[in-house]
Amino acid sequence: MYIKMTKQRKLVLAIINESEHHLTAEEIFMEAKNRINSIAFATIYNNLNALVNEKYIARVKSPGNPDRFDKVTIPHEHVVCDYCGHIMDVHVPEIKEMLEKRLKLSLTSFSLDMHYVCDTCKQS
């Protein structure tokens, strides 16, 4: 299905693409509000869902934390800091091959939860 790239969708996509981090809907809303003062949170939320559904962006779920949004849509994993919630992309394509070989299965997808303590939190 094709979605029209409205001004608001372009803005949400630009904010995500400009960021070096995996932003929450709230963080995207705050940045969007700086650019278009009249924009509503519901507009951001609805556009995030539409962009995820059309695979322009990916939703990153982390139990106990708000969803975050990722500009990288190719298959990859994430590691999450247990203290501050910082998320890093991890590209290790051989994980799928190793799992398939070990399990003797052909995986269509998988999710791997990896956690760590980031350098900033280690120093705190």
Image: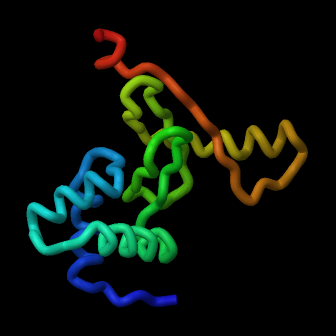
Query: Residue 32 vs residue 119: left or right?
Result: left
Residue visible at 44% across and 42% down? Answer: 89
- In the orientation shown, which residue stands out farthest toward the right? 104
Percent x, y for residue 52?
47, 69
Residue visible at 26% across and 52% down? Answer: 27
**Residue 33's quadrant in the figure?**
bottom left
Percent x, y for residue 94?
65, 41
Of residue 41 and residue 50, the one placed in the foreground of this image is 41
**Residue 46's quadrant in the figure?**
bottom left
Query: Residue 48 vs residue 54: left or right?
Result: left
Q: Does residue 108 sit above or below 48 in this rendering?
A: above
Percent x, y for residue 88?
41, 37
Percent x, y for residue 12?
27, 68
- In the orientation shown, which residue stands out farthest toward the top? 123
Query: Residue 120 vs residue 95: left or right?
Result: left
Residue visible at 19% across and 73% down? Answer: 39
Q: Does residue 55 sit above or below 27 in this rendering?
A: below
Residue visible at 45% across and 51% down? Answer: 67
Of residue 46 and residue 19, the one placed in the foreground of this image is 46
Q: Does residue 116 sit above or below 14 in this rendering?
A: above
- Number of numbered callouts drawn: 0
**Residue 104's quadrant in the figure?**
top right
Quarter holding the C terminus is top left
Give the colouring mode of the picture.
rainbow
